[in-house]
Image: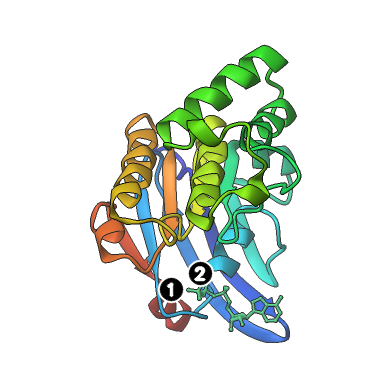
Amino acid sequence: MLPAPAISCRSLSCVVAGRKLIDDLTLDVGEGERVALMGPSGSGKTTLLTTLAGLAPPAEGRVLVGGVPLDERPELRAGLALVFQSYGLLSLLTAAENVEVALRAAGRPPREAMSLAAAALERLRVARFADHLVEELSGGQQQRVAVARALALRPRVLLADEPTAEQDAVHRAVVLDELLAAGAEGTTLVIATHDPEVAERCDRIVEVRTAVRR
Ligand SMILES: Nc1ncnc2c1ncn2[C@@H]1O[C@H](COP(=O)(O)OP(=O)(O)OP(=O)(O)O)[C@@H](O)[C@H]1O
């Protein structure tokens, strides 16, 4: 028997503010696969990612993690991490504390959370801002902290919403390399992006608009 996809949706429809954005989408993303979600601004990529992450219930259809419906087993959300387009950091905490809080919430003991957070910030080239409040960081730096927070969790599935959008060329490469390194270690990646280079380095591109019209 074939292994179940890491994450999938079946006949998924998403309605936002009374408008159907995602219509009858069926998608399977295999374990360790790297998928780029592309489509015009407003086509529903963020909506799809938040629904796959279990943060917004679909209007119709289902999200499955490892073949198990997420609505029946909400604890499966622990294996999913989302890099929010607007970062979703706690602005009154430091960069390090933002990563540590996520690790503590995932059950890591304090000392381990501290060392994992420090390592993740180092890899994303934001270690020197570890003790800075998030509100003191630039948009690009905040975005790298958000990526560090998600990667530090070593999720089964990483859903990332335009994770390189605020980066200069050097840091875009850093973010992309770190995401792909996690992919090489088995993390399944679903990345919404407008960046053709990011998409090119994924295994597959899913056009959100095409999927909607299918
Ligand atoms: N809370 C909301 N209330 C009303 N409309 C919303 C809300 N959230 C999203 N929308 C609308 O839903 C549509 C899809 O938004 P979404 O953010 O999913 O698109 P996207 O493909 O991620 O866009 P982008 O590439 O610009 O990030 C847009 O037209 C947006 O204006």
The amino acid type of the residue labelled 1 equals Val
Could you tell me if residue 86 is visible in this image? yes
Q: Is residue 155 above or below residue 202?
A: above
Q: How many labels does the image show?
A: 2
What residue does disc 1 label?
208
38 displayed left or right of 46: left
Cβ of disc 2 within 8 Å of ligand 1?
yes
The amino acid type of the residue labelled 2 equals Lys
Q: Where is residue 133 drawn, in percent x and y?
A: 67, 42
Q: Is the N terminus in the top left, top right, bottom left or bottom right quadrant? A: top left
Cβ of disc 1 within 8 Å of ligand 1?
yes
Q: Is residue 135 above or below residue 123?
A: below
Q: Is the C terminus in the top left, top right, bottom left or bottom right quadrant? A: bottom left
What's the residue at 42%, 47% (across, down)? 189
Q: Where is residue 181 drawn, in percent x and y?
A: 33, 34
What residue does disc 2 label?
45
Q: Do the residues labelled 2 and 1 touch (CB within 8 Å)?
A: yes
Mark linked to residue 151: none
Residue 30 location, quadrant: top left
Q: Is the residue marked by circle 2 packed among few (<14), some (14-19), or many (20+) residues within 10 Å?
A: many
Query: Which of marks 1 and 2 precedes in the sequence?
Result: 2
Q: In which quarter of the image is ligand 1?
A: bottom right
